[in-house]
Image (tube, helix red, strand yellow):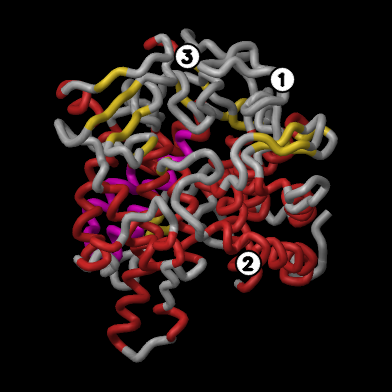
Amino acid sequence: MTSNKPPSYRWEPFAANAESFLQKTQEHALQGLNPGGVYQAIWCRDASYILKDWFLSGNIHGALQQIFLIWSHQISSSKEKLVYGRGSPEMKFLSEVTNGEKEKEFEGSLPTTIYQAGFSEVYGQNPDIDSTALMISTTSWILARALRSDQDDRSSDGDQSARKSTTAAQKSTDYVSTLLYEVGITDPAKVVDYVVPRMLKAIDYLASRDKDKDGLLEQNHNEDWMDTVLRAGKIVYSQACWLLALNDFSILLQRLGRDSDASRLVQLSENTISAVEQKLWSESDGCYVDMQETHHIGGPYRTLTQDVSFYLVAISQNTANDGLVAEFQSEKGPRHELKRIKQNLHSRAISTLESMRTRLWKEKWPLVTEVELKATGPWILKPYQYHNQTFWPWTTGIEMLARSRFDLVEQCDSLLFKLASEGHPHIHAFYEWVNPLTDQGEGAFPFRTGITAIRIAIADIFSKIKK
Protein backbone atom coordinates (compact mmCIF):
# COMPACT_ATOMS: atom_id res chain seq x y z
CA MET A 1 0.00 0.00 0.00
CA THR A 2 1.31 3.43 -0.93
CA SER A 3 1.53 5.96 1.88
CA ASN A 4 -0.38 9.23 1.54
CA LYS A 5 2.27 11.04 3.55
CA PRO A 6 4.53 13.39 1.59
CA PRO A 7 7.94 11.85 0.75
CA SER A 8 9.90 14.20 2.99
CA TYR A 9 7.76 13.29 6.01
CA ARG A 10 8.13 9.55 5.45
CA TRP A 11 11.92 9.93 5.30
CA GLU A 12 12.23 12.07 8.45
CA PRO A 13 13.07 9.24 10.92
CA PHE A 14 15.64 7.82 8.51
CA ALA A 15 17.15 11.27 8.00
CA ALA A 16 17.63 11.81 11.74
CA ASN A 17 19.46 8.48 12.15
CA ALA A 18 21.46 9.06 8.98
CA GLU A 19 22.65 12.47 10.18
CA SER A 20 23.89 10.89 13.39
CA PHE A 21 25.75 8.24 11.37
CA LEU A 22 27.43 10.90 9.23
CA GLN A 23 28.67 12.73 12.30
CA LYS A 24 30.10 9.57 13.86
CA THR A 25 31.97 8.52 10.71
CA GLN A 26 33.24 11.82 9.28
CA GLU A 27 36.79 11.61 10.62
CA HIS A 28 37.24 8.01 9.46
CA ALA A 29 36.22 8.78 5.89
CA LEU A 30 38.91 11.43 5.45
CA GLN A 31 41.89 9.65 6.99
CA GLY A 32 43.32 8.02 3.87
CA LEU A 33 42.70 6.52 0.45
CA ASN A 34 43.54 2.94 1.46
CA PRO A 35 40.62 0.76 2.63
CA GLY A 36 41.81 0.93 6.23
CA GLY A 37 42.86 -1.47 8.93
CA VAL A 38 45.56 -3.88 7.75
CA TYR A 39 45.10 -2.76 4.13
CA GLN A 40 47.67 -0.05 3.39
CA ALA A 41 47.78 -0.07 -0.42
CA ILE A 42 45.33 1.68 -2.76
CA TRP A 43 42.60 -0.53 -4.19
CA CYS A 44 41.14 1.19 -7.22
CA ARG A 45 37.60 -0.09 -6.70
CA ASP A 46 37.56 0.93 -3.04
CA ALA A 47 39.21 4.26 -3.82
CA SER A 48 36.27 5.08 -6.09
CA TYR A 49 33.97 5.23 -3.04
CA ILE A 50 36.45 6.95 -0.76
CA LEU A 51 37.19 9.70 -3.30
CA LYS A 52 33.50 10.39 -3.89
CA ASP A 53 32.98 10.74 -0.15
CA TRP A 54 36.00 13.06 0.06
CA PHE A 55 34.44 15.30 -2.58
CA LEU A 56 31.05 15.30 -0.84
CA SER A 57 32.81 16.15 2.44
CA GLY A 58 34.62 19.14 0.95
CA ASN A 59 38.04 17.56 0.38
CA ILE A 60 37.97 18.60 -3.28
CA HIS A 61 41.69 19.26 -3.75
CA GLY A 62 42.60 15.96 -2.14
CA ALA A 63 40.20 14.07 -4.39
CA LEU A 64 41.55 15.73 -7.56
CA GLN A 65 45.15 15.04 -6.58
CA GLN A 66 44.49 11.38 -5.94
CA ILE A 67 42.50 10.99 -9.16
CA PHE A 68 45.58 12.22 -11.02
CA LEU A 69 47.78 9.82 -9.07
CA ILE A 70 45.60 6.76 -9.69
CA TRP A 71 45.32 7.35 -13.44
CA SER A 72 49.11 7.74 -13.61
CA HIS A 73 49.21 4.01 -12.77
CA GLN A 74 47.04 3.01 -15.75
CA ILE A 75 48.53 -0.12 -17.29
CA SER A 76 50.68 0.38 -20.38
CA SER A 77 53.64 -1.39 -21.92
CA SER A 78 56.88 -1.35 -19.90
CA LYS A 79 55.69 1.35 -17.53
CA GLU A 80 56.20 -0.15 -14.07
CA LYS A 81 56.44 -3.55 -12.44
CA LEU A 82 53.10 -5.37 -12.62
CA VAL A 83 52.24 -8.78 -11.22
CA TYR A 84 49.07 -10.78 -11.91
CA GLY A 85 47.34 -14.09 -11.27
CA ARG A 86 47.37 -14.46 -7.47
CA GLY A 87 43.59 -14.96 -7.42
CA SER A 88 43.36 -17.19 -10.49
CA PRO A 89 42.79 -20.97 -10.23
CA GLU A 90 44.00 -21.26 -13.84
CA MET A 91 47.35 -19.94 -12.61
CA LYS A 92 47.24 -22.13 -9.47
CA PHE A 93 46.83 -19.00 -7.35
CA LEU A 94 50.43 -18.00 -8.04
CA SER A 95 51.40 -14.53 -9.22
CA GLU A 96 53.67 -13.82 -12.16
CA VAL A 97 55.40 -10.69 -13.40
CA THR A 98 53.88 -9.46 -16.64
CA ASN A 99 55.87 -9.22 -19.84
CA GLY A 100 55.42 -6.76 -22.70
CA GLU A 101 52.78 -8.86 -24.45
CA LYS A 102 50.68 -9.24 -21.34
CA GLU A 103 50.92 -5.52 -20.57
CA LYS A 104 49.78 -4.79 -24.12
CA GLU A 105 46.80 -7.11 -23.57
CA PHE A 106 45.91 -5.27 -20.34
CA GLU A 107 46.61 -1.79 -21.73
CA GLY A 108 44.05 0.83 -20.76
CA SER A 109 42.84 -0.90 -17.59
CA LEU A 110 43.65 0.02 -14.01
CA PRO A 111 45.33 -2.44 -11.65
CA THR A 112 43.47 -3.97 -8.76
CA THR A 113 46.04 -2.66 -6.27
CA ILE A 114 48.62 0.15 -6.30
CA TYR A 115 51.37 -0.55 -3.77
CA GLN A 116 53.59 1.98 -2.08
CA ALA A 117 56.62 -0.10 -3.02
CA GLY A 118 56.49 1.09 -6.65
CA PHE A 119 54.56 -1.69 -8.33
CA SER A 120 50.98 -2.67 -8.99
CA GLU A 121 48.98 -5.89 -9.07
CA VAL A 122 46.18 -7.37 -11.15
CA TYR A 123 44.66 -9.88 -8.76
CA GLY A 124 43.11 -12.30 -11.27
CA GLN A 125 44.14 -13.69 -14.62
CA ASN A 126 42.80 -10.50 -16.21
CA PRO A 127 42.18 -7.00 -14.81
CA ASP A 128 38.94 -6.89 -12.86
CA ILE A 129 36.17 -5.00 -14.61
CA ASP A 130 34.90 -3.18 -11.54
CA SER A 131 38.18 -1.50 -10.54
CA THR A 132 38.50 0.26 -13.89
CA ALA A 133 34.79 0.93 -14.42
CA LEU A 134 34.15 2.36 -10.96
CA MET A 135 37.15 4.67 -11.18
CA ILE A 136 35.88 5.96 -14.56
CA SER A 137 32.50 6.58 -12.95
CA THR A 138 33.83 8.38 -9.87
CA THR A 139 36.40 10.41 -11.81
CA SER A 140 33.73 11.59 -14.25
CA TRP A 141 31.21 12.32 -11.50
CA ILE A 142 33.72 14.42 -9.54
CA LEU A 143 35.14 16.29 -12.53
CA ALA A 144 31.70 17.21 -13.91
CA ARG A 145 30.86 18.84 -10.58
CA ALA A 146 34.30 20.33 -10.01
CA LEU A 147 34.23 21.98 -13.43
CA ARG A 148 30.82 23.46 -12.77
CA SER A 149 31.94 24.76 -9.36
CA ASP A 150 35.14 26.16 -10.88
CA GLN A 151 33.17 27.96 -13.60
CA ASP A 152 30.84 29.41 -10.99
CA ASP A 153 33.85 30.65 -9.00
CA ARG A 154 35.36 32.30 -12.05
CA SER A 155 32.14 34.07 -12.99
CA SER A 156 31.43 35.47 -9.53
CA ASP A 157 32.85 35.75 -6.06
CA GLY A 158 31.11 32.45 -5.37
CA ASP A 159 30.10 30.80 -2.17
CA GLN A 160 33.04 30.12 0.14
CA SER A 161 31.63 26.67 0.90
CA ALA A 162 31.74 25.79 -2.79
CA ARG A 163 35.50 26.32 -2.77
CA LYS A 164 36.06 24.54 0.51
CA SER A 165 38.90 22.07 0.13
CA THR A 166 39.80 20.56 3.43
CA THR A 167 42.83 18.53 2.47
CA ALA A 168 42.80 16.49 5.66
CA ALA A 169 43.96 13.43 3.75
CA GLN A 170 47.31 15.12 3.07
CA LYS A 171 48.23 14.29 6.66
CA SER A 172 47.83 10.53 6.15
CA THR A 173 50.91 8.36 5.75
CA ASP A 174 49.88 7.05 2.32
CA TYR A 175 49.16 10.43 0.78
CA VAL A 176 51.94 11.68 -1.50
CA SER A 177 50.52 15.04 -2.45
CA THR A 178 53.06 17.84 -2.01
CA LEU A 179 54.61 17.62 -5.47
CA LEU A 180 51.25 17.19 -7.19
CA TYR A 181 49.91 20.23 -5.40
CA GLU A 182 52.85 22.38 -6.45
CA VAL A 183 52.40 21.56 -10.15
CA GLY A 184 48.72 22.52 -10.06
CA ILE A 185 46.98 19.15 -10.05
CA THR A 186 44.07 20.60 -8.12
CA ASP A 187 42.93 22.53 -11.21
CA PRO A 188 39.88 20.61 -12.56
CA ALA A 189 40.64 21.66 -16.16
CA LYS A 190 44.19 20.29 -15.94
CA VAL A 191 42.98 17.05 -14.42
CA VAL A 192 40.43 16.75 -17.24
CA ASP A 193 43.15 17.19 -19.85
CA TYR A 194 45.19 14.45 -18.19
CA VAL A 195 42.54 11.83 -17.43
CA VAL A 196 39.98 12.03 -20.25
CA PRO A 197 42.28 10.45 -22.88
CA ARG A 198 43.16 7.77 -20.34
CA MET A 199 39.52 7.09 -19.54
CA LEU A 200 38.72 6.74 -23.24
CA LYS A 201 41.46 4.08 -23.44
CA ALA A 202 39.93 2.42 -20.40
CA ILE A 203 36.53 2.36 -22.11
CA ASP A 204 38.13 0.67 -25.11
CA TYR A 205 39.69 -1.93 -22.85
CA LEU A 206 36.44 -2.68 -21.06
CA ALA A 207 34.50 -2.87 -24.32
CA SER A 208 37.00 -5.49 -25.50
CA ARG A 209 35.90 -7.73 -22.61
CA ASP A 210 32.66 -8.39 -24.51
CA LYS A 211 34.27 -11.28 -26.35
CA ASP A 212 31.13 -12.61 -28.06
CA LYS A 213 29.72 -9.15 -28.86
CA ASP A 214 26.40 -9.76 -27.11
CA GLY A 215 26.50 -6.52 -25.07
CA LEU A 216 27.70 -8.18 -21.85
CA LEU A 217 31.25 -8.15 -20.49
CA GLU A 218 32.76 -11.50 -19.56
CA GLN A 219 35.16 -12.24 -16.72
CA ASN A 220 37.15 -15.15 -15.41
CA HIS A 221 37.36 -16.44 -11.84
CA ASN A 222 37.81 -13.91 -9.01
CA GLU A 223 37.90 -10.88 -11.31
CA ASP A 224 35.53 -8.80 -9.21
CA TRP A 225 35.24 -7.60 -5.61
CA MET A 226 34.21 -11.07 -4.34
CA ASP A 227 37.72 -12.36 -4.84
CA THR A 228 37.22 -15.83 -3.36
CA VAL A 229 33.82 -16.82 -4.81
CA LEU A 230 35.23 -17.96 -8.19
CA ARG A 231 32.50 -16.39 -10.30
CA ALA A 232 33.16 -16.61 -14.03
CA GLY A 233 30.98 -15.55 -16.94
CA LYS A 234 28.49 -12.71 -17.31
CA ILE A 235 28.10 -11.23 -13.83
CA VAL A 236 25.26 -8.80 -13.07
CA TYR A 237 27.40 -6.71 -10.71
CA SER A 238 30.11 -6.21 -13.33
CA GLN A 239 27.57 -5.08 -15.94
CA ALA A 240 26.33 -2.53 -13.37
CA CYS A 241 29.85 -1.14 -12.88
CA TRP A 242 30.20 -0.87 -16.67
CA LEU A 243 26.88 0.98 -16.94
CA LEU A 244 27.87 3.47 -14.26
CA ALA A 245 31.13 4.17 -16.09
CA LEU A 246 29.28 4.75 -19.37
CA ASN A 247 26.63 6.90 -17.73
CA ASP A 248 28.86 9.24 -15.72
CA PHE A 249 31.56 9.54 -18.40
CA SER A 250 28.88 10.42 -20.99
CA ILE A 251 27.74 13.32 -18.86
CA LEU A 252 31.29 14.64 -18.47
CA LEU A 253 31.97 14.33 -22.19
CA GLN A 254 28.78 16.24 -22.98
CA ARG A 255 29.85 19.04 -20.65
CA LEU A 256 33.14 19.17 -22.52
CA GLY A 257 31.31 19.44 -25.85
CA ARG A 258 32.50 16.00 -27.02
CA ASP A 259 29.11 14.90 -28.26
CA SER A 260 30.41 12.21 -30.61
CA ASP A 261 32.29 10.42 -27.85
CA ALA A 262 29.32 10.80 -25.52
CA SER A 263 26.92 9.35 -28.09
CA ARG A 264 29.13 6.30 -28.51
CA LEU A 265 28.98 5.65 -24.78
CA VAL A 266 25.21 6.11 -24.73
CA GLN A 267 24.91 3.47 -27.46
CA LEU A 268 27.09 1.07 -25.47
CA SER A 269 24.87 1.70 -22.44
CA GLU A 270 21.73 0.95 -24.46
CA ASN A 271 23.26 -2.29 -25.71
CA THR A 272 24.27 -3.36 -22.20
CA ILE A 273 20.88 -2.69 -20.63
CA SER A 274 19.11 -4.52 -23.45
CA ALA A 275 21.45 -7.51 -23.05
CA VAL A 276 21.01 -7.65 -19.27
CA GLU A 277 17.23 -7.57 -19.65
CA GLN A 278 17.31 -10.34 -22.24
CA LYS A 279 19.93 -12.65 -20.73
CA LEU A 280 20.37 -11.99 -17.02
CA TRP A 281 16.73 -11.66 -15.97
CA SER A 282 15.32 -14.92 -14.59
CA GLU A 283 11.55 -15.16 -14.70
CA SER A 284 11.57 -18.27 -12.49
CA ASP A 285 13.72 -16.57 -9.85
CA GLY A 286 11.98 -13.23 -10.14
CA CYS A 287 15.31 -11.42 -10.15
CA TYR A 288 18.52 -10.79 -12.06
CA VAL A 289 20.97 -13.69 -11.82
CA ASP A 290 24.52 -14.21 -13.07
CA MET A 291 25.12 -16.31 -16.17
CA GLN A 292 27.99 -18.55 -15.14
CA GLU A 293 30.33 -20.18 -17.63
CA THR A 294 30.40 -23.97 -17.92
CA HIS A 295 33.91 -24.00 -16.43
CA HIS A 296 32.65 -22.07 -13.41
CA ILE A 297 34.14 -23.53 -10.20
CA GLY A 298 32.10 -21.93 -7.42
CA GLY A 299 28.46 -22.72 -6.96
CA PRO A 300 25.67 -23.35 -7.19
CA TYR A 301 24.96 -21.71 -10.54
CA ARG A 302 21.72 -19.97 -9.53
CA THR A 303 23.11 -18.35 -6.38
CA LEU A 304 21.60 -14.94 -5.67
CA THR A 305 24.14 -12.38 -4.45
CA GLN A 306 23.52 -9.08 -2.72
CA ASP A 307 25.56 -7.16 -5.29
CA VAL A 308 22.89 -7.58 -8.00
CA SER A 309 21.34 -4.53 -6.29
CA PHE A 310 24.12 -2.53 -7.94
CA TYR A 311 22.38 -2.99 -11.30
CA LEU A 312 19.28 -1.34 -9.85
CA VAL A 313 21.46 1.59 -8.81
CA ALA A 314 22.97 1.78 -12.29
CA ILE A 315 19.66 1.82 -14.18
CA SER A 316 18.22 4.47 -11.87
CA GLN A 317 21.29 6.73 -11.98
CA ASN A 318 20.46 10.24 -13.26
CA THR A 319 16.88 9.23 -14.12
CA ALA A 320 13.74 11.29 -14.50
CA ASN A 321 11.33 11.02 -11.59
CA ASP A 322 8.49 9.84 -13.82
CA GLY A 323 10.20 6.84 -15.35
CA LEU A 324 13.42 4.90 -15.76
CA VAL A 325 14.74 6.79 -18.76
CA ALA A 326 18.37 7.78 -18.32
CA GLU A 327 19.14 11.32 -19.42
CA PHE A 328 22.54 12.48 -20.63
CA GLN A 329 22.42 16.23 -20.88
CA SER A 330 24.95 19.06 -20.76
CA GLU A 331 24.15 22.61 -19.82
CA LYS A 332 24.46 23.77 -23.44
CA GLY A 333 24.49 20.61 -25.55
CA PRO A 334 21.54 18.68 -26.98
CA ARG A 335 19.65 16.18 -24.85
CA HIS A 336 20.41 12.52 -25.40
CA GLU A 337 17.91 10.03 -24.04
CA LEU A 338 18.05 6.28 -23.94
CA LYS A 339 15.09 4.67 -25.64
CA ARG A 340 12.36 3.94 -23.13
CA ILE A 341 13.39 0.80 -21.37
CA LYS A 342 10.94 -2.08 -21.28
CA GLN A 343 7.72 -1.13 -19.55
CA ASN A 344 8.17 -3.85 -16.96
CA LEU A 345 11.63 -2.72 -15.82
CA HIS A 346 10.27 -1.04 -12.68
CA SER A 347 8.39 -4.18 -11.69
CA ARG A 348 11.54 -6.25 -12.30
CA ALA A 349 13.48 -4.00 -9.97
CA ILE A 350 10.85 -4.32 -7.23
CA SER A 351 10.71 -8.08 -7.78
CA THR A 352 14.50 -8.34 -7.49
CA LEU A 353 14.52 -6.39 -4.23
CA GLU A 354 11.75 -8.59 -2.86
CA SER A 355 13.65 -11.73 -3.88
CA MET A 356 16.69 -10.40 -2.07
CA ARG A 357 14.63 -9.71 1.03
CA THR A 358 13.14 -13.20 1.11
CA ARG A 359 16.23 -15.13 0.04
CA LEU A 360 19.15 -13.13 1.46
CA TRP A 361 17.76 -11.58 4.65
CA LYS A 362 18.30 -14.13 7.44
CA GLU A 363 16.91 -13.03 10.80
CA LYS A 364 16.89 -9.51 9.30
CA TRP A 365 20.58 -9.78 8.40
CA PRO A 366 21.08 -9.07 4.67
CA LEU A 367 23.71 -11.62 3.66
CA VAL A 368 26.11 -11.30 0.75
CA THR A 369 25.34 -14.83 -0.56
CA GLU A 370 22.20 -16.86 0.09
CA VAL A 371 23.66 -20.37 0.48
CA GLU A 372 26.91 -21.93 1.58
CA LEU A 373 29.44 -21.81 -1.23
CA LYS A 374 30.56 -25.15 -2.63
CA ALA A 375 34.08 -24.00 -3.46
CA THR A 376 36.21 -20.93 -2.74
CA GLY A 377 39.80 -19.93 -3.37
CA PRO A 378 42.53 -18.97 -2.85
CA TRP A 379 41.11 -18.66 0.67
CA ILE A 380 39.13 -21.77 1.63
CA LEU A 381 36.20 -20.25 3.48
CA LYS A 382 34.23 -21.70 6.35
CA PRO A 383 30.51 -20.89 6.54
CA TYR A 384 29.85 -17.33 7.76
CA GLN A 385 33.38 -16.22 6.86
CA TYR A 386 34.37 -13.42 4.44
CA HIS A 387 32.16 -13.88 1.32
CA ASN A 388 30.44 -17.03 2.57
CA GLN A 389 26.99 -16.02 3.93
CA THR A 390 28.12 -12.97 5.89
CA PHE A 391 26.89 -9.43 6.47
CA TRP A 392 28.91 -6.81 4.54
CA PRO A 393 28.32 -3.13 5.39
CA TRP A 394 29.73 -2.19 1.96
CA THR A 395 27.15 -4.08 -0.12
CA THR A 396 24.41 -3.33 2.39
CA GLY A 397 25.04 0.36 1.77
CA ILE A 398 24.57 -0.32 -1.96
CA GLU A 399 21.38 -2.28 -1.28
CA MET A 400 20.08 0.58 0.87
CA LEU A 401 20.79 2.98 -1.99
CA ALA A 402 18.96 0.71 -4.45
CA ARG A 403 15.92 0.45 -2.18
CA SER A 404 15.85 4.21 -1.70
CA ARG A 405 15.73 4.71 -5.48
CA PHE A 406 12.47 2.76 -5.49
CA ASP A 407 11.09 4.53 -2.40
CA LEU A 408 11.20 1.53 -0.05
CA VAL A 409 11.51 3.73 3.02
CA GLU A 410 10.86 1.18 5.75
CA GLN A 411 13.41 -1.24 4.33
CA CYS A 412 16.02 1.52 4.19
CA ASP A 413 15.27 2.26 7.84
CA SER A 414 15.79 -1.40 8.68
CA LEU A 415 19.14 -1.59 6.87
CA LEU A 416 20.47 1.63 8.40
CA PHE A 417 19.48 0.40 11.86
CA LYS A 418 21.52 -2.77 11.30
CA LEU A 419 24.49 -0.82 9.93
CA ALA A 420 24.49 1.67 12.80
CA SER A 421 23.80 -0.90 15.52
CA GLU A 422 26.18 -0.72 18.47
CA GLY A 423 25.63 -4.20 19.86
CA HIS A 424 29.37 -4.77 20.31
CA PRO A 425 32.32 -2.36 20.88
CA HIS A 426 31.87 -0.57 17.56
CA ILE A 427 29.02 -0.04 15.16
CA HIS A 428 28.68 -2.72 12.49
CA ALA A 429 29.56 -0.34 9.67
CA PHE A 430 33.14 -0.07 10.91
CA TYR A 431 33.94 -3.72 10.13
CA GLU A 432 34.82 -5.32 6.83
CA TRP A 433 32.21 -8.00 7.44
CA VAL A 434 30.16 -9.39 10.35
CA ASN A 435 29.44 -13.00 11.28
CA PRO A 436 25.61 -13.15 11.43
CA LEU A 437 25.64 -16.02 13.95
CA THR A 438 27.89 -14.38 16.54
CA ASP A 439 27.28 -10.70 15.72
CA GLN A 440 31.06 -10.24 15.77
CA GLY A 441 32.88 -7.95 13.37
CA GLU A 442 35.67 -9.50 11.32
CA GLY A 443 38.32 -8.47 8.82
CA ALA A 444 39.82 -5.01 8.52
CA PHE A 445 38.88 -2.35 11.08
CA PRO A 446 37.93 0.37 10.50
CA PHE A 447 37.03 -0.57 6.92
CA ARG A 448 36.77 2.73 5.11
CA THR A 449 35.12 1.30 1.98
CA GLY A 450 32.03 0.23 3.88
CA ILE A 451 31.82 3.49 5.80
CA THR A 452 32.08 5.63 2.66
CA ALA A 453 29.62 3.51 0.62
CA ILE A 454 27.00 4.05 3.31
CA ARG A 455 27.76 7.76 3.53
CA ILE A 456 27.40 8.08 -0.27
CA ALA A 457 24.05 6.30 -0.11
CA ILE A 458 22.89 8.67 2.62
CA ALA A 459 23.99 11.71 0.57
CA ASP A 460 22.01 10.40 -2.40
CA ILE A 461 18.94 9.87 -0.21
CA PHE A 462 19.24 13.36 1.29
CA SER A 463 19.35 14.76 -2.24
CA LYS A 464 16.15 12.83 -3.00
CA ILE A 465 14.44 14.20 0.09
CA LYS A 466 15.36 17.80 -0.80
CA LYS A 467 14.00 17.38 -4.32
Q: Quadrant of the N terminus?
A: bottom right
- Residue 160 vertical position relative to residue 429 in the rendered view, above or below: below
Is residue 259 highlighted in magenta?
yes
Residue at screen point 24% across, 53% down: 195
Left or right placement of residue 74 versus residue 367 in this view: left
Q: Could one spot residue 250 in this view of the protein?
A: no
Question: Residue placed at 82% from the left, 39% from the top?
Answer: 364
The amino acid type found where label 1 is placed reads Pro
**Mark 2 = which residue?**
462
Residue at image mark 1: 383
Residue 268: x and y in percent read: 34, 41
| First-in-chain label (3 vs 2) | 3
Rounded to the nearest angstrom, the CA distance separating label 3 from label 2 is 40 Å
Amino acid, disc 3? Glu
Mark 1 element type: loop
Q: Which amino acid does label 2 sit on?
A: Phe
Q: Name the spot of residue 461 as percent of width and height, x first.
A: 63, 62
Q: Nearer the viewer, residue 245 or 124?
A: 124
**Residue 21 seen from this side:** yes
Residue 338 is inside the magenta segment: no
Q: Mark 3 points at which residue?
A: 293
Foreground mark, 2 or 1, reads 1
Q: Is mark 3 on a helix, strand or loop?
A: loop
Judged from the image, the secondary structure of the residue bearing numbered disc 2 is: helix
Give the magenta range. 238-267
